[in-house]
Amino acid sequence: MNIGKNLFSGNKIYKIGYDITQFGTATILLWIGIFKFTPTEAASIKPLIEYHPFTFWVYDVFSKQTVSNFIGIIEISLAIILLLSIKFHFLKRYAGLGIIFTFLITLSFLFFTPGMWRIKDGIPITDYFILKDLAYLGFGFILLSQAMTSDKKEKDTKILSSY
């Protein structure tokens, strides 16, 4: 009977959930990043980017496809850093910061893109594909917190070992 208890302990369940979140986030970043290299995705992100107060200028400098490709490179790089952070824990800080930055920007499209919100059956709705980014934003903060906690433990260990 202890087999079931050990198999489903709180720590193991947490680890399963964490791993699913980490691999799921990396998979989605990789997949969406690859899709950014297509003309379909380049066209679909243009309205989001051209009305944003931080990115409105990019189409004056770069082509629609170049902008999309650049974003794709960022998303693919972030997915790789996230996966590498499994083995190289110091990368969690960069993965966390990158995820936080990326998903704060994408969530801000909800407020700057014309026509993003509309009323349906008396309820305000939006394009739900962006709302998923709330969960990814939370995961970015978890990664950053883990990196900071790990850094503190290493620093404390170095201080203690110097005595």
Image (cartoon, rainbow, N blue to C red):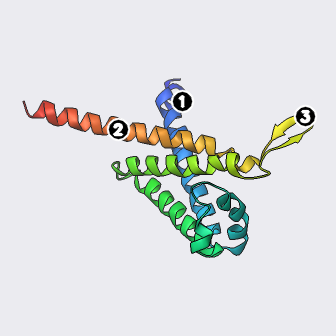
Q: Residues within 10 Å of mark 3 (few under 14, many from 20)?
A: few
Secondary-structure class at tag 1: loop
Compared across the picture, whether 72 is left or right of 157 comes to right
Residue mark closest to the camera, 3 vs 2? 3
Pointers 2 and 1 in contact (CB under 8 A)?
no
In the rendered structure, find residue 28 and report the number of the disc placed on it: none
Q: Nearer the viewer, residue 136 or 62?
A: 62
What residue is disc 3 on?
122
> What is the quadrant of residue 135 in the picture?
top right
Q: CA distance from mark 3 to mark 2?
A: 44 Å
Please tell me which of labels 2 and 1 falls first in the chain: 1
Q: Is residue 68 visible?
A: no
Q: Nearer the viewer, residue 123 or 18?
A: 123
Q: Amino acid at mark 3?
A: Gly
Residue mark closest to the camera, 1 vs 3? 3
What residue is disc 1 on?
8
Compared across the picture, whether 71 is left or right of 80 comes to right
Please tell me which of labels 3 and 2 falls first in the chain: 3
Secondary-structure class at tag 2: helix
What residue is disc 2 on?
148
Where 163 falls versus 120 (above or below)?
A: above
Q: Position of residue 55 (x, y in %)?
A: 59, 60
